[in-house]
Amino acid sequence: MQLEELVAHCLGKPGAEETHPWGEAELVAKAGGKAFAFIGLDSGGVSVKCGRDAAEAAEWRARYPSAITTSAYVGRYGWNSVDWTGPVPDDEIRELVDASYDAAVAALPRSRRPPAPA
């Protein structure tokens, strides 16, 4: 997967917005003000929520031990860092981003949820 494809997939989600809270090296994709993807623009990695908790996220790390690792600081909450340039197929990277987005939106109060696509 190319960086442009990953960013376009993230920002193509309903209500998605691009932010750079820590400078231009990392893009944080948010929906309703809640982050669902941290994209390292220089690193080839994206951090996404990979399950309800650390145990579910560990299943992804077991499948791709060379490409998926525990995210710093938020790994205990089910976040993993994924090398999108590595062996993880593009459709599975999109699946991870989609699930992370869905989890973020589900955690929002109804008043802040983006409208569902028609």
Image: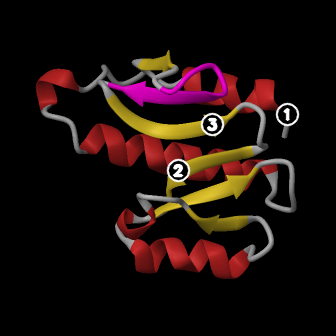
Which residue does the image show at 34% across and 42% down from the upper left? 104
Q: Which residues are the magenta region?
A: 22-31
Q: Does residue 17 sit above or below 60 in this rendering?
A: above
Residue 7, position as x, y percentages in the image: 67, 26
Q: Nearest the camera: 94 or 6?
A: 6
Q: Does residue 5 sit above or below 56 in this rendering?
A: above
Residue 2's mark? 1
Q: Earlier in the sequence, mark 1 or mark 3?
A: 1
- Report the predominant secondary structure element of the magenta stretch: strand
Quick one: quadrant of the N terminus?
A: top right
Q: Nearest the camera: 32 or 12?
A: 32
Which residue does the image show at 66% across and 82% down from the upper left? 62
Measured in 3D between alpha carbons, the distance from the residue under mark 1 to the one under mark 3, in whole angstroms, is 12 Å
Q: Residue under circle 2? A: 48
Q: Nearest the camera: 64 or 23?
A: 23
Q: Earlier in the sequence, mark 2 or mark 3?
A: 3
Quick one: quadrant of the C terminus?
A: top left
Secondary structure beneath dot 2 equals strand
Secondary structure beneath dot 3 equals strand
Residue 13, position as x, y percentages in the image: 50, 25
Q: Residue under circle 3? A: 39
66 lies left or right of 52: right
User: Of the residues tagged 2 and 3, which is closer to the observer?
Assistant: 3
Q: Which amino acid type is marked by label 2? A: Val
Observer able to see residue 31: yes
**Crowdedness of circle 2 by 10 Å Cα count: few (<14), some, many (20+)?**
many
Measured in 3D between alpha carbons, the distance from the residue under mark 2 to the one under mark 1, in whole angstroms, is 17 Å
